[in-house]
Image: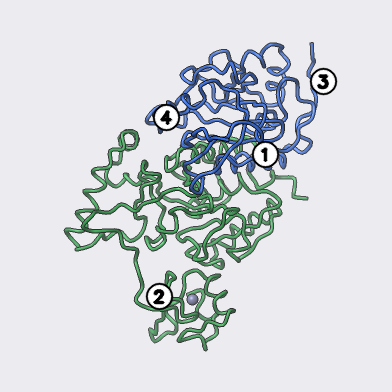
Chain colours: A blue, B green
Amino acid sequence: MTTVAEMPAGFADKVLAAQSTFRSVMDAMARPGTVQRIQAVSGVPAPMMRGAAAIALTLFDQDTPVWLDSKLAATMDVAKWIKFHTSAPVIADPAVCAFAVVADAAALPSFEHFAFGTGEYPDRSTTIILQVASLTEGPAYELRGPGIDGATILRAAIGVPDLLDRLALNASLFPRGIDLVLVSGESIVALPRTTRLVAKEG
Amino acid sequence: MNAPTYNFAYLDEQTKRMIRRAILKAIAIPGYQVPFASREMPMPYGWGTGGVQVTAAILGPIDKLKVIDQGSDDTTNAISIRKFFEKTAGVAVTTSTGDATVIQTRHRIPEAMLQAHQVLVYQVPIPEPLRFLEPRETETRRMHALAEYGLMHVKLYEDIARFGHIATSYAYPVKVNARYVMDPSPTPKFDNPKMDNCAALQLFGAGREKRIYAIPPYTSVVSLDFEDHPFEPYKHKACCALCNAEDSYLDEIVTDNKGSRMFVCSDTDYCETRQSQGHRGSENAAPYAESANA
Ligand SMILES: [Zn+2]
């Protein structure tokens, strides 16, 4: 059992690290497909990645219910770390979470389990922070949409079955929808609900 | 580094997190107005507290901030906002559009083309483009949800019928990413084409009305119009009297107490840059400082 006194450190300089991490996330969201680097966090409990932890420290608080997938919820370490550092409630029902953190991409629940927002308030939706194997190696995807000058290529090992079908369904709901932030180590790529993906040969 | 009585960039961290989350949603849903819990700022609402809060939430120590008001870096409003961030964030400031990483603006988009590493933050008084048609928030939300913009078109068409052209020359409504009708804030419609497919991220903050919205880079922004009456940006039939620019937005200023007038660029950095490059207008013999703050 970890006590509060034993809790490992988060950001060394909370204010500036949160600002720098936010700008990386903002740039990622504004320029889908670009790989952004995130400020290092020490003492992150496995299997949470450092990039996901930095985003948690930057965006989570008592107003953002957080859902963890079963891999992250397998021990209490991640939930405890999140509660200690961010005060965010860790909840069991993904339908009302502001953020979902997912370590096992292959077992990602279908998007309907999360919050899409409403027509009047499409911002009341879940942002999924998805840990993936790589954001530089893997299948190639061609991305289009706001934030992209024409088209861009993303190579990533995302590992979600039926990813393109899920994203197509998500797109059809616009302006409702799920926004994804992919994390691999300290790198991130955002796929907001406006981004269109197609598989690319080679 | 800073006085210990306030946090970096003034806002407390919880407020920044809330604003930052709103900014991310705004980027993900281009043109949609995200509600946020606007905070009291140490300046009156008319001074752009929405823009100031957005700037405070994004600004970091490596940024270079430019603040313009009606195109000028030198109005009381622009100077006091710039000083506010120099003091609370220790951030570097500039009047050069090209050197800035964050530009906070009221009423204008710089003439120099914005670049991909820049963020343009607009101070917005009235974010709801449908407000003059429908005062009820529940109704305007419903209209946006259903993309029910027929009334907006009717209003613009009435302008044509009455005036022979579309009379709205400021805050001319646009459609963002072929979905949301958005108020570009009280910028002149001259500036509307600069919003389209812009390389920079554009963020809008309305303090009193508690809304944040965004246009991601490289996003389609179309000024509402009709096939038989296409959108025409306002064009001056004059050149800048100081730098001879033909492509910039001009202000008419009084030059003496006998009512003499001349047209000069509203964007002072653009005008000064052109003059330093040797461009000369009809009045450039007169010292620029005499007329800049009219
Ligand atoms: Zn000029």
Q: Quadrant of the rendered structure where residue B260 is?
A: bottom left
Mark sitting earlier along the chain (4/1): 1
Q: Which residue is mark 1?
A: A21
> Dot 3, crowdedness within 10 Å: few (<14), some or many (≥20)?
few
Q: Residue at x 60, y 23 (%)?
A: A159
Counting from the top left corner in percent of width and height, residue B59 is at 64, 49
- Secondary structure, mark 3, is helix
Q: Chain under label 3?
A: A
Q: Residue at x 51, y 74 (%)?
A: B293
> Dot 2, crowdedness within 10 Å: few (<14), some or many (≥20)?
few
Same-chain check, marks 4 and 1 = yes
Q: Quadrant of the N terminus of chain A?
A: top right
Q: Which residue is mark 2?
A: B252
Same-chain check, marks 4 and 2 = no
Mark 1 and mark 3: Cα distance apart in space? 26 Å
Mark 4 and mark 1: Cα distance apart in space? 26 Å
Mark sitting earlier along the chain (1/3): 3
Task: Indicate left or right for A56 with B38 as reference.
Answer: right
Q: In the figure, B250 relative to B7: above or below?
A: below
- Secondary structure, mark 1, is helix
